[in-house]
Amino acid sequence: MRIVNASAALLGVSALLALPAAFAAERVQVVTSFSILADMIENVGGEHVEVTSLVGPDSDAHVYSPRPTDARSLAEADLVVFNGLQFEGWMERLIDASDYAGPLVTTTEGIRKLAYHGHDHGHAHGHDDHGHDDHSHDDHGHDDHGHDDHGHDDHGHDDHGHDDHGHDDHGHDDHGHDDHGHDDHDGHDDHDHGDQDPHGWQDLAMGKIYVANIRDGLIEADPDNAAAYRENAERYIAEIQAMDEEMRRLLGEIPASTSVITGHDSFGYFANAYGLRFLSPVGLSTEAEPSAANMARLIDVIREQNVQALFHENMTSPAIINQLAEETGLAIAGTLYADALAAEGEASTYLGMMRHNAQTLHDALAQPGHDDHGHDGHEDHDHDHDDHGHGHRH
C-alpha cells in the first residue's frame, strides 16, 4: 500500500487553495466609482476582470467620502473607470491622491450631453424641452464596436486616444477637476454638478457609448484579451438595444402630457429619450432640501397638470415625496432607481434597473392603446444598430 507523505499532501492542498487567488491576481483589477458602472464593466470584462466598486448598491455616490483604503485600491488597479461631468467629484481628487498612473476611462466621453437647467421645476426635463433630434447622436451607429482602432473616432473620441486615455483628463471641462473641491461635499446642499447633467446612463443610447468607452479602456489595459472584450461589448450593446426597444413600447402607452414627480432631478436623459416630463422638488443633489416656496410651487404644478402618481427614488429621502402625497392626496406608485443599483432583485443590474423603471412608470401611468409620444423622432436614434456585428475586425 502506498503511503503519501503528510507534508507533501499538505503542500498539494496549499497549491490547490492558492489557485483561485492566483487566478484572481491574473485578472484585470478594475476600480470604478459606483454600482451602475461596475455592472457594465462586469458585462464587458467577464471572466477577465475583477471589479471593485467604491460606492456599492443602494449607496449614494453624490456624497460619498473616500476612505484611505480606497486610495490604495486605486494605486493597485490596472484600470480606473468613472462617470465624469462632476457626478463624483471626490473620485478625481482620489485619483490624484493615489498617484494612479494607468488607463483612465471617463464613461461620459462622447455622449450627447444635456444641459442642466437648475431648479426650474415648472420647466422640468421633458420631450418637449429637449427635442428628440438629440438622438441622432452621430450615433454612434455603433458599427464601430470592436474595431481595431478601438472606435474612438466613431464617437467623438479623437481627442481621447489611447496613448492619453484620460491621464490628463483630470483637467477636462467634462469633470471640472479644479472646480469642485471638498467644500462642495461638506455642505451637501451646495453639491455643484456644473452646467451639464451627469446622469447619461439613464438614456440607453448613451449607455451604449458608456459600454464602448469601457471596452476601449479594457483593451488598453489588457490587449491580450481584446477579442473577448469586443465580443462581450457587442453582445451587451445588442442587449441594451433590445431593452431600449422594449422600454419604448412600454412608455409609449403613457400620454406625452404626463408629468412624473421624483425625489431629485436625475431623469433628464430618461425624459429626453423616452418622451416623459419629470419634475423634482430639488435639483441634482440627493441631499438638498426643498424650500417651502419650491414645495408650494410644485404642489400647484401637480394640481394644474393633473399629475396621477408620485414616485420614491432609491437615493433620496422618502420624506419629501411622502409630504407631497399627504398634501395632494396622490398615491405613491413605487420606487425608481437613478444613481445606484439595488442590492438584490430586478434592479440589481443596469438593464434590470432600466426595465424596472419603465415597468413601474407604465403600471402607474399607462393608458393602453395610447401612443402619442411621437417616438418617430427616436427611431433613427440608434440607426444602424443591427450593424453591431458587421465590419468588426477581431
Image: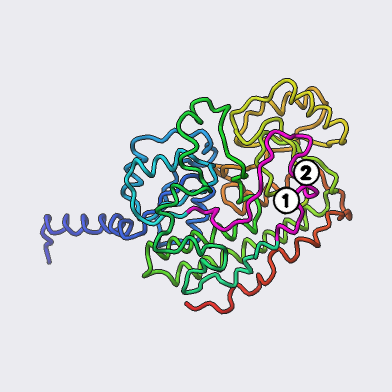
Q: Is 31 on the left-hand or right-hand side of 176?
A: left
Identify whether 138 is placed above or below 122: below
Rendered location of residue 240, percent (x, y): 63, 61
Rendered location of residue 345, percent (x, y): 59, 46
Q: Is 239 on the left-hand or right-hand side of 121?
A: left
Q: Write down the quadrant of residue 360 in the picture.
A: top right
The amino acid type found where label 2 is placed reads Arg
Identify the residue at horizontal 34%, vertical 45% (top origin). Answer: 73
Give the label on residue 272, or none. Answer: 1
Closer-to-camera residue (261/155): 155
Question: The N terminus is located in which quarter?
Answer: bottom left
Residue receiving disc 2: 277
**Secondary structure of the residue carrying numbered label 2:** strand
Identify the residue at horizontal 83%, vertical 32% (top origin). Answer: 302
Count residues near mark 2 (Cα–Cα under 10 Å), then give few for <14, some for 14-19, many for 20+: many
Q: Earlier in the sequence, mark 1 or mark 2?
A: 1
Rendered location of residue 260, percent (x, y): 77, 40
Q: Is 278 on the left-hand or right-hand side of 369?
A: left
Identify the residue at horizontal 74%, vertical 43% (top origin). Answer: 125
Residues in magenta? 106-135
Identify the residue at horizontal 41%, vertical 49% (top origin). Answer: 31
Give the label on residue 127, or none. Answer: none
**Secondary structure of the residue carrying numbered label 1:** helix
Rendered location of residue 97, percent (x, y): 34, 40
**What is the spatial separation of the Cα atoms under label 1 and label 2, in whole angstroms?**
8 Å
Identify whether 148 is placed above or below 170: below
